[in-house]
Image (tube, helix red, strand yellow):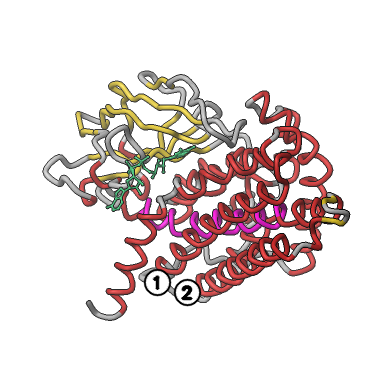
Amino acid sequence: MDEQDPLQQPGVDDETFAGLLAQVERFVRERLVPLERQVDEDDEVPDEIVGEMRALGLFGLSIPEEYGGIGLSVSQEAEIAKAFGWTSPAFRSVFGSTIGIGSQGIIMDGTPEQKETFLPPMAAGELIGSFCLTEPDAGSDAASLRTMALHEGDHYLMNGTKRFITNAPRAGVFTVMARTDLSEPGARGISAFIVNADWPGISLGEPDRKMGQKGALTSDVIFENVEVPPERIIGGVPGRGFVTAMKVLDRGRLHIAALCTGTARRLIHEALAYSAERKQFGKPIGEFQLIQAMLADSEAECYAAECMVADAAARYEAGEQITQEASCCKMYASEMVGRVADRAVQIFGGAGYIADYGIERFYRDVRLFRLYEGTTQIQQLIIAREMRKRQGG
Ligand SMILES: Cc1cc2nc3c(=O)[nH]c(=O)nc-3n(C[C@H](O)[C@H](O)[C@H](O)COP(=O)(O)OP(=O)(O)OC[C@H]3O[C@@H](n4cnc5c(N)ncnc54)[C@H](O)[C@@H]3O)c2cc1C
């Protein structure tokens, strides 16, 4: 690593972590799993559940203890993400943008004042953070973003539209990537700002109507002549926002990969149970070798992804540069869970296509993992670029 990453924290001791993980697993299985269908139908996570998430400290999982968080290591955070993968991803999304891309830019590159101001309320779940990078005309090519924040007098004037922003309707602050230097069309002209959601000139689009992950809220965020004080630039220095965004995404990709392994575990569990129960031709379908082949492929691929995540997290904690490994994990795990979900539908047969069984919901939910935080194609490009760099090419 070029510089010490404050997120390379050692984490909590093993006993404390085991207690937290057991608590989270209980919460997921006893409180969240029974609500999966309701959340899908209502497109909303109940406020009561959000309150329980606050009480569990979930909004502060990765925020250092000195700012009121739990201060988990990357490996520990991955274990918790995996535990949340057992249920609908919409639940994790409630706190995911705060512990992930919403707060980590501030932890990694923020000034001491920014950390003091924003991290404690984020850790307490009182201030929800959202990450605004994508725009209508800048998705995979994020460095071409057009949202402007031009220095005028004692402030920056922000104008532009951000698209598909997770938790925008709940957010108290947005981390906004905006161009501060028009003479720099690429990454170097971009700064990261912490912007209060209730400042004049900010409005939200209609909530997006998504294929899956109902209950995880996304919308456009529109900035019209929003006055942003210079002390809201992360780190206080303009032109470093894109570097911050990319560092945040490295770690976020590991988190998403871990989440995918949890969802794959749930789907394997459901498929295995169904294959033991469902009888055709006078015996449980699980006795047919063609069904066993699907179960075995899912198991082996899930196990591979788990090993990848554990290895990449350990390397991160050892101070290695893991851009390549994080992209490998995100690409492999998100594609893997897509295949596992597809096989689960197949093992359930017609029931896999019917909403009552919940498998089709997971099938829709997991599709997103191959798209956001960098599509599979973008991960391929990153992996190949890093391979060539390491080879000196
Ligand atoms: C539900 C949801 C939540 C999201 N949450 C957030 C959020 O909180 N914050 C945020 O900033 N963004 C968020 N996003 C945006 C997400 O990260 C982008 O949608 C994603 O990065 C892809 O960008 P795009 O949609 O513009 O697709 P495009 O970039 O237009 O890509 C279209 C296709 O072209 C391919 N492609 C593009 N460039 C290349 C290339 N060079 N080589 C090969 N293939 C290429 C892509 O892989 C894809 O298959 C969210 C998106 C969704 C759907």
Pointers 2 and 1 in contact (C-beta within 8 Å): yes
In the displayed structure, 156 sits above or below 370; it is above
Asked if the stretch drawn in magenta spans residue 262, the answer is yes
Instruction: Pick the residue in front: 39 or 314.
Output: 39
Quadrant of the rendering where the N terminus is positioned: bottom left
**Quick one: label 2 or label 1, which is nearer the N terminus?**
1
Residue numbers of the magenta segment: 244-267
User: Which of the 4 image quadrants contains residue 220?
Assistant: top left
User: Where is ligand 1, by quadrant?
Assistant: top left
Look at the picture and state if 219 lies above or below 19: above
Q: Is residue 232 visible?
A: no
Q: Main secondary structure of the magenta part?
A: helix
* Residue that numbered label 2 is attached to: 319
> Which residue: 55% across, 70% down?
308
Q: Amino acid at mark 1?
A: Met
For image coordinates 59% across by 36% down, the residue present is 213
Mark 1 lies on residue: 1
Q: Position of residue 40 (x, y in %)?
A: 66, 30
